[in-house]
Image (cartoon, rainbow, N blue to C red):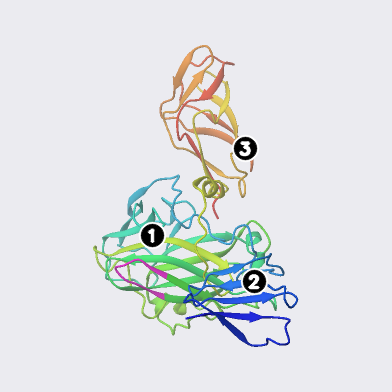
Amino acid sequence: MATSIISAGDASNLGLQTTGGDDGALVLRSGAAGAKVDALSIAASGTATFVGEVAGVSAINSGQIGGRRNILYNGEMKVAQRSASETGLGAASGYFTLDRWNMAIGAASAGRYTMAQVADGPAGFANSLKISTTTADTSIAAGEYLLLQQRFEGQDLQQLQKGTATSKQVTVSFYVKGNASATYTCEFNDVDNGRQIAQEFAVTTSWNRIELTFAADTSDPLDDDNARSLDLNFWLHAGSTYTGGTFSSNAWKDSVANTRASDSQTSIFDSTSRTFFITGVQMELGATATEFEHRSFGDGLALCQRYYEVMGIGSLSGVAATTIVITCSGSYVIQKRAAPTAVLLDTTPSFLQAGTGVKTGSSSAIASSVLGVSGCRLDINGFTGLTVGKGEFSNSADMVSLESEL
């Protein structure tokens, strides 16, 4: 196939020219007659090469050109500050392993599962989130559900322009696989206004990329604050309270409980062999799923630390307030969404007492605290033989967690 040439600005040459060769390229030329230059060439492979600058491009996929396209956190399942794996889950909701990924339950279920960060993924992804059923529940009560979800602050979603005439479509893409074929539901839940939109997706035994574009919603804007406004839900288990109606795919509606999950919804609790793997989760403006936006571990960790952070060696310093209590303070690595909850992870914490050596507590607890968005002051008890007034410096890894999740 010969090269085709479009030569602009030359009245004597308004059609296509071809040159010798079999490259099958298309070339656009511009300039005055006799002095034309190649402005754009498109190879047979589809690769486009511009000679000059590309001007006038104001958006990619209806969104920003640079910066973060992916609105979601920890989509490639790199960050797991709490734990890499937890088993026996299913009796309560909570954040258990991978950062920003919450597990939410409805009515009590007999089903139990393990949630883990595993070294398995499609090309380009080292990790995925794996949910494995350990106790089946085939007698599903009406109010049961199990959701894998991520929750968002309203102030981080104003670019969606929800509730306006110019509201944007949103595309969610992700890689999934399981032990067997299954059908699950992906849903946006507008917490501010009680509205939902959902689509079902299929899982096979091989890694597949799912791409779901959700319709724009011209009703009910999201609040512009740091509170929970929108959830991205993956329905993994649902009783008839959520599946008993007629499922309407990709249509915003005021909340109708029995239409939230697909009519074809699989229960992850149907067998102890059931597994669900997911990674490469991306949420972006527009109707096109672009390539996954990879981030460094450090960037991903910093984003997650707005909601959860662990303080350890060298993070806290203070003085012995009494012979049994250390008063200490520290600054967070990242400012928190709101004043956090502090939990003493190590009940035998150690502090380096100036001029004396290491002092270790026993059955210690946080006796009192002052918690702000940038730092904290803690009174930690359970010590003996402290020298009042002596300086104290935290000497334990993973001593205190600060959580400000939605």
- Choose between 12 and 93: the one closer to the eye: 12
The residue at the point 49 percent across, 27 percent down is 381
The residue that label 2 is drawn on is 38
Q: Quadrant of the C terminus?
A: bottom right
Circle 1 residues within 10 Å: few <14, some 14–19, many ≥20: few
Q: Are marks 1 and 2 in contact (CB under 8 Å)?
A: no
Q: Is residue 369 left or right of residue 112?
A: right
Disc 3 residue type (three-letter): Gly
The residue that label 1 is drawn on is 123
Q: Is residue 157 left or right of residue 78?
A: right
The answer to whether residue 194 shows anywhere in this view is no
The residue that label 3 is drawn on is 375
Disc 2 residue type (three-letter): Asp
Specify start and end residues of the magenta stretch as a single range: 201-209
Circle 3 residues within 10 Å: few <14, some 14–19, many ≥20: some
Q: Secondary structure at mark 1?
A: loop
Q: Secondary structure at mark 3?
A: strand
Horizontal and vertical percent position of residue 85? 35, 49
Q: Are marks 3 and 1 in contact (CB under 8 Å)?
A: no
Q: Place residue 130 in its image quadrant.
A: bottom left
Is residue 135 depicted above or below 43 in this figure?
Answer: above
- Choose between 193 and 296: the one closer to the eye: 296
Circle 2 residues within 10 Å: few <14, some 14–19, many ≥20: some
**In the rendered structure, which disc, 1 or 2, sits on the residue that comes first in sequence?**
2
CA gap, disc 3 and disc 1: 40 Å
Horizontal and vertical percent position of residue 380? 51, 29
Horizontal and vertical percent position of residue 258? 44, 78
- Per the image, is 355 magenta? no
